[in-house]
Each structure stands twice: as structure tokens, then as C-alpha cells.
Image (cartoon, rainbow, N blue to C red):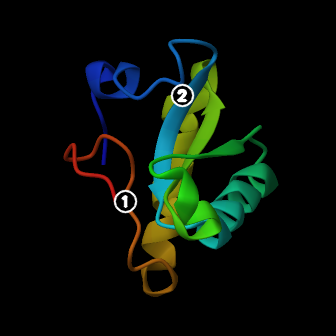
């Protein structure tokens, strides 16, 4: 599913070189998604968001370099659609403005 550039720019990490392409409901899933992106050849990192006391059980953003964001998100969407049963609680950033 393609996203427009405005949706992507609304989810940049501090307006810098990183762009949020995915929000995972917890650290375990975020680490799995980061690893999938890394195996696909993308530089990826994670960052906790939300309430600090939730720790690893709170939501995590998955970020890639802004220049690779569109390509990385397309790759991630393909991976997740092939494995939808493994990731039922996930949402890509910006699809409908509602992230989990």
C-alpha cells in the first residue's frame, strides 16, 4: 500500500535523517521487525515511545534512514503481508493515522 510523501514527513524522527516507518506494540516485535529489515539490507533502529514506565511492553517506533524510508516500508509491508498471522497487532506508521 503506497503512502504519500506528507504521511512520511509527518513521522520523521525529529525532522532529521531518520524516518519512522512502523510502530510495533512492544519491544519484542520491534526487534523482530528491525531484524527483518536488516536482513533485507536496510539500516534500521528502534525507539521506545509513549509512557516511559511501560518499558519493553510499550510501543516502539522502527526507523530507517529518511532516504530509504519509502523502499524500506514497501519491503516491510511485503514481508508482513506474507506473514500476517505472525504479526496481528501491528500497524505501519501513517497508513490511516492510527498507530498501535
- Residue at the far bottom in the pictured view: 85
Question: Which mark is drawn over residue 19?
Answer: 2
Q: x%, y% of residue 53?
A: 55, 59
Along the polypeptide, which appears first: circle 2 or circle 1?
2
Question: Which mark is drawn over residue 91?
Answer: 1
Q: Residue at x 45, y 48 (%)?
A: 50
Whether residue 3 sits left or right of residue 48 in the image: it is left
Q: Residue at x 49, y 58 (%)?
A: 59
Query: Regarding mark 2 in the picture, which secondary structure is present there?
Result: strand
Q: Residue at x 44, y 87 (%)?
A: 85
Whether residue 78 sits left or right of residue 100 in the image: it is right
Q: x%, y% of residue 16?
A: 59, 12
Q: Tell me the distance, in whole angstroms, between the alpha carbons under discs 2 and 1.
A: 15 Å
Question: Which mark is drawn over residue 8?
Answer: none
Q: Residues within 10 Å of mark 2 (few under 14, many from 20)?
A: many
Whether residue 20 sits left or right of residue 97 in the image: it is right
Do tag 2 and tag 1 residues touch (Cβ < 8 Å)?
no
Please tell me in which quadrant of the rendered image residue 90 appears.
bottom left
- Name the residue nearer the viewer: 3 or 14: 14
Query: Regarding mark 1 in the picture, which secondary structure is present there?
Result: loop
> In the picture shown, does residue 12 fall above or below 92?
above
Please tell me in which quadrant of the rendered image residue 43 appears.
top right
Q: Residue at x 38, y 44 (%)?
A: 93
Q: Residues within 10 Å of mark 1 (few under 14, many from 20)?
A: many
Q: x%, y% of residue 9?
A: 38, 19
- Name the residue nearer the viewer: 76 or 24: 24
Image quarter hosting the C terminus: bottom left
Q: x%, y% of residue 49?
A: 51, 46
Amino acid at each position: 500500500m503506497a503512502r504519500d510523501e506528507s504521511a512520511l514527513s509527518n513521522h520523521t524522527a525529529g525532522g532529521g535523517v531518520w524516518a519512522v516507518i512502523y510502530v510495533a506494540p512492544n519491544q519484542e516485535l520491534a526487534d523482530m521487525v528491525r531484524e527483518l529489515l536488516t536482513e533485507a539490507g536496510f539500516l534500521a533502529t528502534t525507539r521506545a515511545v509513549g509512557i516511559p514506565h511501560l518499558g519493553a511492553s510499550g510501543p516502539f517506533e522502527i526507523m530507517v534512514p529518511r532516504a530509504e524510508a519509502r523502499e524500506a516500508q514497501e519491503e516491510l509491508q511485503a514481508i508482513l503481508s506474507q506473514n500476517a498471522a505472525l504479526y496481528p497487532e501491528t500497524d505501519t506508521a501513517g497508513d490511516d493515522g492510527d498507530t498501535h
